[in-house]
Image: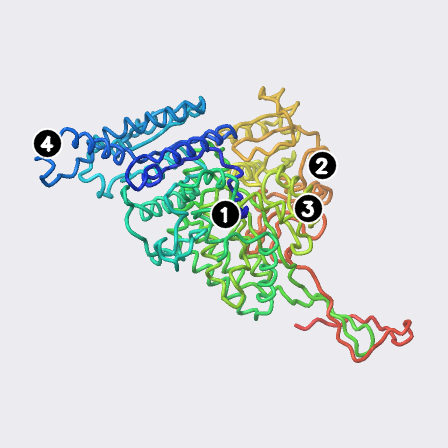
Amino acid sequence: MDRVDSTRAFVKGVKLIVVKVGTAVVTRSDGRLALGRLGALCEQIKELITLGHEVILVASGAVSVGRQRLRYRRLINSSFADLQKPQVELDGKACAAVGQNGLMALYDTLFSQLDVTSSQLLVTDNDFRDPEFRKQLSGTVKTLLSLKVIPIFNENDAVSTRRAPYEDSSGIFWDNDSLAALLALELKADLLILLSDVEGLFSGPPSDPQSKLIHTYIKEKYEGLITFGDKSRVGRGGMTAKVKAAVYSAQAGIPVVITSGCAPDNIIKVLNGERIGTLFHRDANTWGPSGAVGARDMAVAARESSRQLQAMSPGARSKILLDIASALEANEQNITVENEADVAAAQQAGYEKSLISRLALKPGKISSLANSIRVLANMEEPIGHVLNRTEIASGFVLEKKSSSLGVLLVIFESRPDALVQIASLAIRSGNGLLLKGGKEARRSNAALHKVITSAIPENVGQKLIGLVTSRDEIPDLLKLDDVIDLVIPRGSNKLVSQIKESTKIPVLGHADGICHVYVDKSADMGKAKGIVLDAKTDYPAACNAMETLLVHQDLVQNGGLSELVVELQTKGVDIQGGPRASSLLNIPETRSFHHEYNSLACTIEIVDDVYAAIDHIHRHGSAHTDSIITEDRETAEIFLQQVDSAAVFHNVSTRFSDGARFGLGAEVGISTSRIHARGPVGVEGLLTTRWIGKGNGQVVNGDKGVVYTHKDLRLCA
């Protein structure tokens, strides 16, 4: 029995499936229809529908069926003399016109026996040049699928306008394999299955005993090295066409499996995650030479590589970072293309603007990231730094040194630039790293991961940084408290809470970014306007953006509150109010003060004084970043000392709460925890300490064998 393979774990989430059945599958060697195979195909599709899947069928075979029928008609309508003459090959368009009718009649009969309704959709290459056609096509298919009807597609060869429909490979599609790939993209399918008359893609012609089945296709490994056999005996392109369509589809984010359609249950096996056929997946190049790497294997490999990294000289570790910075700049165009594809897909999927804003790598971002990495590379060496030195006894010296944590698991959403920051910080601090980014950024993350790991030298190994590609792997990773040393979730409150509840591994992060700006009665209103606008509008989707504006009650009387409201509204900020502000300003009342907008919106509330502001922050804030605007030093000190947040500011924007702006080079995240690290976490937050003792034969012997001095020694310059 075929075993379930971890590379196929993604099929658990598959809903919409495009199945393309090749001519060689639906016909026998003599050209007649293979009724048994067609029946098995229909039965499998029926089962998929019963299991809740949606199925689109792309059916080849019309030309072959029509050719058989027309040959018969020509035979019975020919005289004996006619049959002695050289026989002219039948026109393919005529064959298609005759065969399509018979093929669809057969599908209709077979599906009807299973209480399933099918429908026919004939298309041509030119149809897809019309945007309105694409729109109408999508709407029709969605309606059919909602009614549990099977849409059956085929190219309308009978009226195709291409010069040589069986040879011309120009245009939008050129055979039913490429049509299936096009439809999978157009209709946003979750999986494309290409059924062939062989088990899958082989390293050479399937008839060659030396050829081996390729279970997972990796373009970088196999492209140009595979010897294809003869063209399909009845179809247009055979395996060459299937591979071309599969690579195209997989690179666009839709997994593909090429498998045999001659077996009665291979489609079901694919959906069960069994290792049959050949899988084409965009992230396959990150899975290693033998397919997907198990969670433990990935973590262990990262630890082993991290120890090699720690053993390098400080200069060698810095050089890796400099090489990564240069590699990012050299590959900026490729990274941008992948990121633009992610952004376009997110927009089509209807994601919120705040997420799309975090997802986009805006012009100049790659250069900025590269420069940040260079800052990290030129920082003082953080590993092995002597923090203190103590003489325990004469001839026995104990040192406390900074040390790498080990292996980090970072789970982040939306922002692909976070991958670069996290990876560079991990390398600088000598840690192994496992990364799981949001699915909306999978193209960008894969491109960035490939560029970064390619710059890591062989003696350390690319497995230093593992890219986790499936959500299904996260539960297994969170169980590895013996291998993974720290989990850092960067994302929503829900994500952080789920992680904390699911693991024994220490978790570093913040749940929310409910940041406040308090404008005191003694504030300089010029400063206040600039700071408030910057805190809210510079980057509204950031976790350090202002979500609540607190205003001293005296500013209601002197017009200061109105000025701030006008400034915010002029910038397009949607304002809600607390009970006092909503009543006074006649604005909607907020449902909750503990709300992170992540957009051009904020809450305003009026407070009596600085103590009321502090109390509000402690009751409704998230201990992230809070700022006071005042010219009264005593009031400022009260705020700075009593507000219990990771970062507390005076007369500056909350947007400064950032690793790069703090001079940390970059940040792995912002922590609101009170243990280990707090605020923006840079290199120091990814280090722990070790004790290094050097003696000369000392023994304890019940504390009678040593005379303790416990003398602090000067640190070496």
- Please name whichever residue, 712 or 520, is drawn nearer the observer in this view of the structure: 712
Q: Can residue 290 be seen from the camera position used here?
A: yes
Left or right of 634, for residue 711 = right
| Crowdedness near tag 4: few (<14), some (14–19) or many (≥20) residues, C-alpha within 10 Å | few
- Residue count near mark 1 (Cα–Cα under 10 Å), binned few <14, some 14–19, many ≥20: some
**Closer to the camera: disc 3 or disc 4?**
4
Residue at x 41%, y 35% (from the top left corner): 18
Q: Which residue is mark 3?
A: 503
Q: Closer to the observer: label 1 or label 2? A: 1
Q: Earlier in the sequence, mark 1 or mark 3?
A: 1
Q: Residue at x 63, y 65 (%)?
A: 383
Q: CA distance from mark 3 to mark 4?
A: 83 Å
Which residue is denoted by mark 2 in the rendering?
618
* Residue furthest to the front: 80
Residue 28 spot, x, y in % from top left: 32, 39
Q: Which residue is mark 4?
A: 79
Q: Earlier in the sequence, mark 1 or mark 2?
A: 1
The image quadrant that residue 307 belongs to is bottom right
Q: Earlier in the sequence, mark 1 or mark 4?
A: 4
Indicate the amino acid at tag 1. Answer: Arg
What type is the residue that disc 4 sits on?
Ser
Q: Secondary structure at mark 1?
A: loop
On the picture, is 27 further left or further right than 611?
left
Give the image quarter of residue 429.
bottom right
